[in-house]
Image: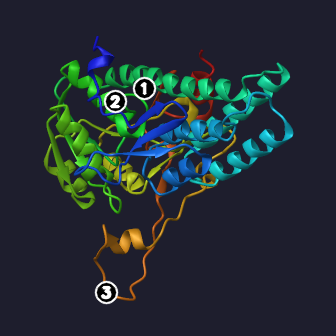
Amino acid sequence: MPDISTLTDRVAPLKRKGDAVYFLDQLALPGTVRYKRCATPAAVADAIRTMVLRGAPLIGCAAAYGYAFAAKGAGKADAAVLGRLAKAERLLAASRPTAVNLFWALKAMSGKTRSLCAAKTTRLYRELLAAADAVTREDVETNRRMAAHGAALLKKGSTVMTICNTGALATAGIGTALGVVRWARRLGKIKLVYALETRPYLQGARLTMWELQREGIPARLITDGMAAHIMKTERIDAVLTGADRVAANGDAANKIGTYGLSLLAKAHGIPFYVVAPSTTVDLATAGGDDIPIEERSEREVLEVRGLRLSPAGARARHPAFDVTPARLITALVTDRGVVKPPSRARLKKVLSKC
């Protein structure tokens, strides 16, 4: 069994020091490792919105701290403090619309506030900060459980394909889909990883390859348009992706391009595994058509790091996510178990496990 303490590279995407949290600036990677200090709800919301940090589980952890900062210095929960907390909750909820972990974390923190008020606490801020710490610690353990479940699905010497970044940079732990890769590598089950570059933000090129290189996992970077050719001409044993929201019927929203990758996997008879914590499952959302899809700036498609790629006056679209129907997903890997294949009934059954 792999030792979880050796599965990450010690460059944490989130560090809490006193009354501030420091986020690894993922916009600066891979060339520069630097941290952005955030000590207010507004600063955390801005870091989420501008993608200084990203990845559904990490966004949830960040939001928990942002919420807690609204009560900074408060002992008792008076009307003014509760007003600040409500305002912070609205601000953070508006930062990204698709990743459900954000809303899960805010719901958990507001619930903690209500219980602290009922208990007439005199340590409100410190208790909320401790609650945010607990959200982060739980994500580490959740990652471990997902990795073990997912690695069991792979055979020895597998070549796998992945999109976007689903590693330590997207969570507080070892990652979701890339956490499975890390765990499986220690078990001798990973021969090679093909990482899609993931246009337009290039999370695969900039972040996933950075993580894989740091851990010495053999990998090849390919453009998104190369996936079909690689599947046709080489043996790909599995496709592993993350998810930002899973609907009650098993449909999964993830980084734009994931749906197309699932269609390619189906056409080539390749297992398609979605790896996501149970907190990413939104039973209040019936199906994929009900998941809000964030539309980001055209500029992020028309430019790469300030370099204009298209003619002046050209227009673009930038839906940041797409939805993979449950029928194209071989299995959904969660911290509570594997849902294979995903369905409303199977999902509820697995989620009911403690």
The residue shown at (37%, 70%) is 301
Which comes sooner in the sequence, label 3 or label 1? 1
The colour style of the image is rainbow
Say which quarter of the image contains residue 132. top right
Question: Which of 350 and 280 lies nearest the eye of the viewer?
Answer: 280
Give residue 311's mark: 3
Q: Which residue is drawn at 58% across and 36% down?
A: 65
Amino acid type assigned to the residue bearing label 2 in the image: Gly
Q: Answer left or right for 151 relative to 97.
A: left
3 up-or-down from 118: above or below: above
Residue under numbered circle 2? 179
Q: Position of residue 326 (x, y in %)?
A: 50, 42
Quarter of the image that includes the C terminus: top right
The answer to whether residue 343 shows anywhere in this view is yes
- The spot of residue 276 in percent (x, y) is 47, 34
- The CA span between labels 3 and 2 is 40 Å
**Secondary structure of the residue carrying numbered label 1:** helix
Secondary structure under the numbered disc 2 in the rendered image: helix
Q: Earlier in the sequence, mark 2 or mark 1?
A: 1
Q: In this view, does 242 lie above or below 179?
A: below
- Asked if marks 3 and 2 touch (Cβ < 8 Å), the reply is no
Q: Which of 316 and 102 is in front in this view?
A: 102
x and y, in percent, of residue 71 in the image: 70, 37
Q: Please give the residue where the numbered disc 1 appears in the rendered image.
A: 143
Q: Which residue is drawn at 14% across and 36% down?
A: 218
Q: Which amino acid does label 3 sit on?
A: Pro
